[in-house]
Image: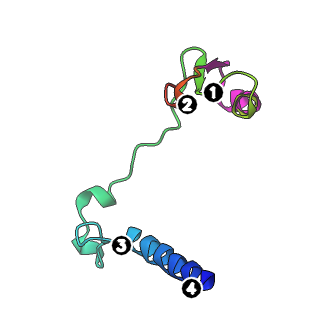
Amino acid sequence: MKEYIALILALCMVFALCACGSQTEAEAPAEDAAQAPAEDTAQAPAAEGWVPDGPVTMIVSYAAGNGTDVTARILSQYAEKYVGQTIVIENVDGGSGSIG
């Protein structure tokens, strides 16, 4: 009996995941390049010229000292090399992370 329930639940999960990946006609990619809208062929501007003016604030939505905070601090050490500015970690805890 338990095997049947597990099988039914597994099939329901498979069907639910298949339904999430469906596309409508408006979202489907164009089959011909001539039919593609002009927005698709235009290239987005490059983000190479962006440089912050001052220190960058990274908001961590959990209390200081937990795993998320430690990970953010390690990540900020490596990111400072690429950003070129100091990255300041600001911990905003509360609301199970929804406040941050």
Neighbourhood count class around disc 3 (C-alpha, 10 Å): few under 14, some 14–19, many 20 upward: few
Where is residue 1 shown, x and y percent of the image? 59, 85
Please tell me which of labels 2 and 1 falls first in the chain: 1
Q: CA distance from mark 3 to mark 1?
A: 36 Å
Q: CA distance from mark 2 to mark 4?
A: 39 Å
Three-letter code for the amino acid on which mark 4 is drawn: Tyr
Label 1 near label 4: C-beta < 8 Å? Answer: no
Q: CA distance from mark 4 to mark 3?
A: 28 Å
Q: Identify residue for label 1.
A: 62
Span shown in magenta:
72-91
Neighbourhood count class around disc 4 (C-alpha, 10 Å): few under 14, some 14–19, many 20 upward: few
Q: CA distance from mark 3 to mark 2?
A: 32 Å
Neighbourhood count class around disc 2 (C-alpha, 10 Å): few under 14, some 14–19, many 20 upward: few
Determine which quarter of the picture holds residue 90. top right
Give the label, 4 or 1, closer to the camera.
4
Q: Is residue 12 or residue 87 the one in the foreground?
A: 12
Q: Main secondary structure of the magenta part?
A: helix
Q: Is residue 20 or residue 7 the one in the foreground?
A: 7
Q: Is residue 49 or residue 79 the one in the foreground?
A: 79
Which secondary structure lies at badge 4? helix
Instruction: Work out whether 24 lies above or below 51.
Output: below
Label 1 near label 2: C-beta < 8 Å? Answer: yes
Three-letter code for the amino acid on which mark 1 is drawn: Tyr
Q: Identify residue for label 2.
A: 97
Q: CA distance from mark 4 to mark 1?
A: 42 Å
Please tell me which of labels 3 and 1 falls first in the chain: 3
Q: CA distance from mark 2 to mark 1?
A: 6 Å
Can you tell which mark lies on residue 4?
A: 4
Instruction: Work out whether 34 lies above or below 74.
Output: below
